[in-house]
Image: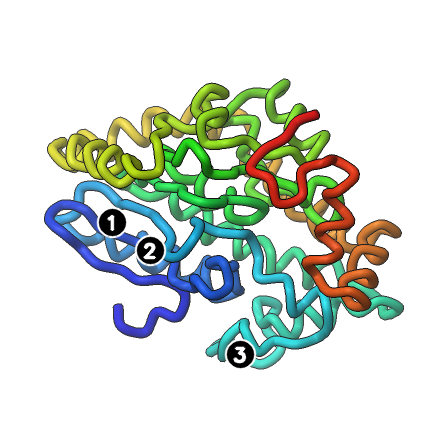
Amino acid sequence: MDNLRTMTYEVTGRIARITLNRPARGNGITMDMPRELAACVERANLDPAVHVIALAGNGTGFCGGYDLIDSAESLNFEHQGKSDLPSGSPADPLVQMQNHIHGQVWDPVIDYQGMSRNVKGFMSLFHSDKPVVCKVHGFCVAGGTDMALCSDLLVIADDAKIGYPPARVWGSPTTSIWFHRIGLEKSKRLLFTGDCLSGKEAREWGLAIESAPPEQLDARFETLLERIARMPINQLVMMKLLLNQSVSQQGLHTTQILGTVFDGITRHTQEGYAFQQRAAEAGFKQAVRERDEPFGDFGMSSFKG
C-alpha cells in the first residue's frame, strides 16, 4: 500500500503492522486517516498470512486527536493534505470547515455525514475479523482514544496520558465506547471532568490490559502479539465474534449515532463558539491552556484534583 498519506502498513511474519505516521502533527487525525485505517484493516483481514494486527504511532505519542490547530484558528487546510474526494463531499475538510463558520447556518446533516464516516473508519478495528492490539506511548487523547479503544487490547506505557479532555468543551466521543471498556461510573468520572489517566492508572481501571515502563513497552507489546499470532486464524475470528456480540447487543451503534450528533452540537454551543473565537485570537494551544488551567492539569500526564 504505497499511496498511504497518514500511516504505514507492513507485514512481519504473522503480524500486520499499522503505524500512524504524522509525527510532526502529533499523528493528528485528518479526514483521510479513518479511510486509510479501514483500508489497512481490510488488507490485513484478507491476507491469509496475517493472524493479528498491531496498531501504533510514530513520534512522541500515539495520537493527539483531530488535527484541529488550523481549523480552530482559521479556515486553513494546509496540513490536511490533498484529498481525492469528489468536490463538495461531506468528507471533504473544506466542506466541513465552511460548515463551521460562526454566523452562518450550520447544517447538522453535513456534519454528521462527515463524522459518521470517521466513526466507521475507527470501528473497522472493532469489526476486524482478526484481533487488533494497540500500543500507546506518550499521549492518546481526544479522537486518538477512538482508535485505541476500538482496538481489542491496549498495551500502554506507565507514563502515557490517555483521556478525552474535549468533554470540557468542543467535543463528544463519537465512538462512544468508554462505557463498554470501563463501565458506567468510571466513564462518568472521566467524561464529567475531562480528566486523563496515566498509563498505570489505565491498567488499574481496566482500560488497558497491560502497562509497562517506557523502556519495556515494546517488548511487552511484541510478547503479546507473538502469543496471539500462534493461534489459528479461525479460532481468533470466532472468539472475537463471540465476545463482540455482547457489546453490540448493548446498543453501541445507537449510542454512536447520538455521540456523533452531539459532537457536532458541542462545536455550535455558546461555549463552543467562544472556544473557537479564542483559538482564532490567541492560537489553539493557548485556548486549550485556558480551558485546562482551571482544572490544574494543562500539560500534565494526569491530575484529578
Pointer 1 and pointer 2: residues touching (CB < 8 Å)? no
* Residue in view at x 46 percent, y 49 percent: 122
The amino acid sitting under disc 2 is: Thr
* Label annotation for residue 19: 2
The amino acid sitting under disc 3 is: Pro
Secondary structure of the residue carrying numbered label 3: loop
- Is residue 138 found left or right of 302 in the rendered image? left
Q: Looking at the rendering, in which quadrant would you find the N terminus?
A: bottom left
Q: Is residue 160 visible?
A: yes
Task: Name the residue beneath numbered marker 3.
Answer: 86
Percent position (x, y) of residue 190? 64, 29
Mark 3 or mark 1, which has the lower sequence index?
1
Mark 1 or mark 2, which has the lower sequence index?
2
Percent position (x, y) of residue 200? 45, 26
* Residue in view at x 63 percent, y 30 percent: 303
Q: Is residue 143 above or below residue 149?
A: below
Mark 2 or mark 3, which has the lower sequence index?
2
